[in-house]
Amino acid sequence: MPAGLVAAGAVAVFLWCGVPAWDLAAFAAYVGIGVALPGTLLWRALTGGGRSTAEDVAAGLALGYAVEVLAYIPARAAGMPLLVLVPPVAVLGTFLCVPGLRRHWRGEAAKERMPGWCAWALAGVVGYLITWSTLSLYRVPIASAYVDMPYHLALVGEVKHHLPPTLPSVLGERLSYHWFVYADMAATSWVTGIEPVTLVYKLSTLPMTVAMVVLVAVLGRRLGG
């Protein structure tokens, strides 16, 4: 219930802020099937899974992002960025065809159910972050924006079209900067056809934020006993 309410709210916000329904559907399909699902299967196979489905999906999304970026770098360098789809297809196919791996599709039957108060608290935090983002980033027209946003957009464009990347503002100068997040956005743009400006200003950061909130809560529960 809390997760469904947050998801419905996020969809309503993005539509209200001008994101085309097709872009929203394509983004959700790619992140869900191409990043989170293979990442979750790998997470369960490598670790045995977490205590709850929410933990598995959040950790799997983080792992899926890592796999995506590691696949995109050589694919873009070879001039064939859509080869970034090979690893998720291979993972899904392997977990479908290998009998010993099929159990990871449903996870462990004895997983804990997240306490209701915890689920609603996480939903509240994510809801607050969506509201803040709507007022400061998503709304059209943008009344004000963080000064670095055009720079982030330029870096996505650079990583989308060139690897190894260079500084967009200085021709031929190597990009010595943390740019893996831009590789994710570039890969998403290639696969879905969504313009980088929509990803940078609206879509891409939300699933990352949700996964971070869930994993911080999981870490707190683990450390707190």
Image: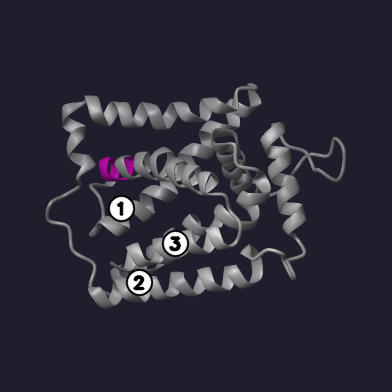
Q: How far apart are the alpha carbons under marks 1 and 3? A: 13 Å
Span colored in magenta = 42-46
Single out the mark in the foreground, 1 or 3: 3
In the rendered view, tell whether residue 82 sits above or below residue 196.
Answer: above
Across and down, in percent, residue 222 comes to 29, 68
Disc nearer the start of the sequence (3/2): 3
Across and down, in percent, residue 58 comes to 37, 55
Report if residue 218 is visible in the image: no
Three-letter code, disc 1:
Asp
Look at the numbered disc 1 and give the secondary structure of its residue.
helix
Where, quadrant-wise, is the N terminus in this rendering? bottom left
Mark 1, residue position: 56
Single out the mark in the foreground, 1 or 2: 1
Three-letter code, disc 2:
Gly
Q: Residue 220 has which mark? A: 2
Compared across the picture, whether 89 is left or right of 116 comes to: right
Mark 3, residue position: 210
As for residue 84 lying within the magenta part, the answer is no
Q: Residue 119 has which mark? A: none
- x 17%, y 39%: residue: 103
Q: Residue furthest left?
A: 110
Compared across the picture, whether 170 is left or right of 219 comes to: right
Disc nearer the start of the sequence (1/3): 1
Question: 54 or 219, which is in the foreground?
Answer: 54
Compared across the picture, whether 199 is left or right of 97 comes to: right
In the rendered view, tell whether residue 66 sits above or below residue 221.
Answer: above
Report if residue 46 is visible in the image: yes
Q: Marks 1 and 2: CB-CB under 8 Å?
A: no
Three-letter code, disc 3:
Val
Q: Residues within 10 Å of mark 2 (few under 14, many from 20)?
A: few
